[in-house]
């Protein structure tokens, strides 16, 4: 399914329902991934979408916060057995679990965000994080002429390398000689909820000359934002708009409109709605990824900076600039 097709279904920046949803049998359900419902990032974006859907429709939904990987199958089976429909799950960690469970419950619609699962009753929503990361990388280089730029990822996996590679390309589109410091908080799911380690990695980047650090680490990223604020430097938030957490210190946030994807998936109430399984790719077209500007960071971004980044965005959309997708080719051209 193409982004341009999806964009036509948007009304007020929230509704994808006609293309992403199907007839509901019961209350929808949402399973947050490790890092917690209130991680101020990926999971919380999903929660905010669910809550907006609830406020707008008067509907109810079920939700669950995972505490460990072993709970995935049990949680999914429980909701499916209760008749929840659709069931939305978050993150690439569901790829091995969802396929077999979806086959056991063929009348239940499943939506997975940030993963691809090939099944007739599963819709796989992916975001072009690399293109949004390119734009915030360009902003980092336009804001700071230190020549050194940091990146703190969460779990060391291809998805997060995708953020890094796009970010690095954006930095070097402005400063071809820039030094990039690439770090990750860990190699297990605990990496999403380790702000102490993330903060230490940010401090190490500062010690090497970085004035801006991009945190793509879920709940761990809060440690980066705090460390950079304490040092009088800049951070870049991720997934949700995190500008408000440290006004004047969070340069911008690379947003993924996970909230809109959840709203769309939950809008399964109409008899006319048709669930469409398969891949859905969301990116710059339609502003499903991008950078945030609001009252908390607008003084940090000059009109010239925004104009230059908007020019980069237009060139990416036109194909004049190609942003490397690490998950398609794990050789970042830097």
Image: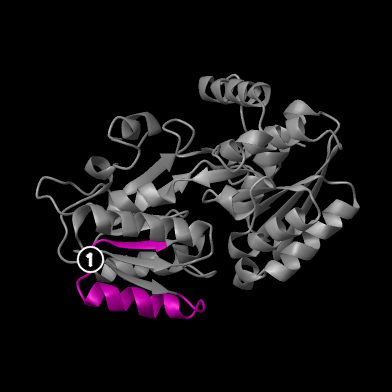
- In the picture as drawn, the residue positioned furthest to the left comes out as 271
Q: Quadrant of the N terminus?
A: top left
Q: Nearer the viewer, residue 204 or 245?
A: 245
Q: Quadrant of the C terminus?
A: top right
Q: Is residue 25 visible?
A: yes
Which residue sits at x=53%, y=57%?
A: 41
Of residues 334 and 137, the one drawn nearer to the viewer in this rendering: 137
Magenta range: 66-89
Residue 147, quarter of picture: top right
Residue 118, given in percent of the width and then of the height, sits at: 37, 54
Q: Is residue 330 above or below residue 183?
A: above
The picture places residue 84, in percent across and down from the top left corner, at 23, 69
Q: Is residue 88 magenta?
A: yes
Residue 270: image location, x then y, percent = 12, 50
**How many numbered discs, if any?**
1
Magenta stretch encompasses residue 166: no
Q: Is residue 213 left or right of residue 148?
A: left
Badge 1 density bin: few <14, some 14–19, many ≥20, Cα 10 Å: some
Q: Which residue is mark 1?
A: 60
Does residue 91 appear in the picture of this structure? no
Q: Is residue 237 above or below residue 131?
A: below
Identify the residue at image location x=35%, y=38%: 13
């Amino acid at each position: 399914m193409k982004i341009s097709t999806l964009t036509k279904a948007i009304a007020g920046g929230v509704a994808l329902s006609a293309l992403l949803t199907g007839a509901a049998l019961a209350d929808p359900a949402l399973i947050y991934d490790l890092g917690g419902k209130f991680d101020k990032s990926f999971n919380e974006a999903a929660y905010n979408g669910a809550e907006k859907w609830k406020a707008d429709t008067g509907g109810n939904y079920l939700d669950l916060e995972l505490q460990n990987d072993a709970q995935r199958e049990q949680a999914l089976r429980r909701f499916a057995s209760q008749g929840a429909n659709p069931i939305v799950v978050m993150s690439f960690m569901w790829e091995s679990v969802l396929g077999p469970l979806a086959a056991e419950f063929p009348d239940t619609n499943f939506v997975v965000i940030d993963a691809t699962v090939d099944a007739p009753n599963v819709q796989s929503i992916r975001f072009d994080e690399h293109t949004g990361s390119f734009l915030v990388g360009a902003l980092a280089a336009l804001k700071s002429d230190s020549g050194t730029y940091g990146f703190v990822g969460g779990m060391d996996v291809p998805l997060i390398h995708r953020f890094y590679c796009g970010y690095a390309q954006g930095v070097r589109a402005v400063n071809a000689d820039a030094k990039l410091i690439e770090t990750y908080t860990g190699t297990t799911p605990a990496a999403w909820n380790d702000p102490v380690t993330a903060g230490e990695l940010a401090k190490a980047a500062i010690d090497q000359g970085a004035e801006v650090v991009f945190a793509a680490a879920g709940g761990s990223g809060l440690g980066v934002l705090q460390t950079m604020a304490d040092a009088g430097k800049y951070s870049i938030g991720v997934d949700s708009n995190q500008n408000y957490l440290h006004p004047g210190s969070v340069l911008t946030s690379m947003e993924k409109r996970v909230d809109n994807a959840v709203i769309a998936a939950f809008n399964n109430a109409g008899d006319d709605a048709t669930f469409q399984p398969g891949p859905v790719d969301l990116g710059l077209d339609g502003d499903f990824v991008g950078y945030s500007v609001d009252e908390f960071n607008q003084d940090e971004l000059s009109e010239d900076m925004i104009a230059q980044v908007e020019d980069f965005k237009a060139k990416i959309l036109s194909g004049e600039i190609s942003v490397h997708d690490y998950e398609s080719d794990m050789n970042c051209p830097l």
